[in-house]
Image: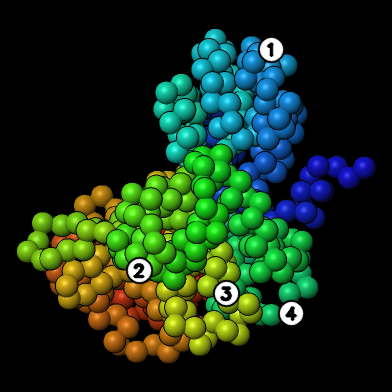
Amino acid sequence: MICPELWYKINMIKREIEGHLERISYQYPVITLTGPRQTGKTFLAKNYFKNKPYFNLEDLELREFALNDPKGFLGQMKDGGIIDEIQHVPELMSYIQVIVDKYRDKKAQFILTGSQQFALMNSISQSLAGRTSVINLLPCSIQEIYNSKRTNEIKDFKTEINDKNFFIYYGFYPAIYKDKINPSHFYADYVRTYLERDLNQLQQIQNISLFRKFLRACASRVGQVLNKESLGNDIGIDASTVERWLSVLETSYILFRLEPYFANINKRLIKSPKLYFYDVGLATYLLDIENQSQIDTHPLKGNLFENMIVMEFLKSRFNQGKNNNLNFYRDKTKEVDLIMREAAHFTAVEIKYAETIRSNLWESLDYVSKLFPKECNKKILVYGGAEEQNRTGLRVIPFNRAQILKNLSDDL
């Protein structure tokens, strides 16, 4: 029998969030792991807390037990346990509150996981506020894939992973790399087995075919300012349905709305968010891109690249246990892809698919730094090339220097 530590080394990509998980395991009685399905939440919990019993509420018989006899269900866990997909029985959290309040000195008693963001957070705010630390585990980062390639945890990829189109096509779900699954097959199954099932649990979707069209329409707007009226008109649904479906996709960690940065200036500011996918590979699949060679000629290649880099910064924040500090800036004149807030200041980031460094790539950064001379203290260009440059007041960073991107986010 393979010991758990060895099994972990040969079967799972090492995640950067592990350091944060270890720290909080000494601080909180309850730890909640949330994020998209298939990002490794269950494995992370079971690997780090090997001695705790595991219960999966996807099991209908177990779920019925927890619903009808919560005290009996929790009574099996004398020293706590791992409860997977806790959102199926949110009533358990009130009983868990009583237990952890009784044994206040015990840390990491219960490890909870869930894939439905809003339902989970609502239950936590009602019963476990101040008693749990919430960890957001997103798909792998570029750095995690690089590290796993170097340590031979993933192999047999003929394509060079320094190619930006490789990541745009493959996305970042661990199973694609560990199990060498064709991305098109993986995402087709993901939509069918997870999205449609989860969404029907959250909200009855009467017309699955129409909902699939909605998903594809969202992908066609990746990296763009959201216009709900236009989105609804394209597929024939009203604005309330658009908002309802957008919300449920956010709940399932599929779509991410990047909010605009507001400031007290005399400019016409865009007030609508920009639309991204938590995983760029899913957006690529929904655009009917069947291999990475098709990306170079696709009209949305720059948008997909932008989606990927925005998520890299968000992953870095979450992996450190930090909150989302990302916005974008846009007025009637210019747009900057990312504004990373840090107290009274911010870092402005422009993201370009181009592989050649030209001065026109950072015109928007210069514009915003002049518009906000006191607030903007850093300017960064992340681009699709390979050369790093430190210019006066500007850092130019290749996307594949993933550790630099991580360090930049660490500082904020």
Lower sequence index among marks 4 and 1: 1
Secondary-structure class at tag 2: loop
Q: Which residue is mark 1?
A: 72
Q: Eyeballing the image, is 354 above or below 227?
A: below
- Identify which amino acid the numbered label 3 is placed on: Asp
- Identify which amino acid the numbered label 1 is placed on: Gly
| Alpha-carbon span between mark 1 and mark 2 | 50 Å
Secondary-structure class at tag 4: loop
* Quadrant of the rendering where the N terminus is positioned: top right
The reply to whether callout 3 and callout 2 are in contact (CB within 8 Å) is no
Q: Which residue is mark 4?
A: 158
Q: Depth check: 314 or 279 in front?
A: 279
Place of residue 396 in the rendered image (x, y in percent of width and height, measured from the top left): 39, 78
Identify the image quadrant of residue 43: top right
Q: Depth check: 12 or 219 in front?
A: 219
Q: Which mark is residue 288?
A: 3
Secondary-structure class at tag 3: loop
Secondary-structure class at tag 1: helix
Q: Eyeballing the image, is 91 above or below 45?
A: above
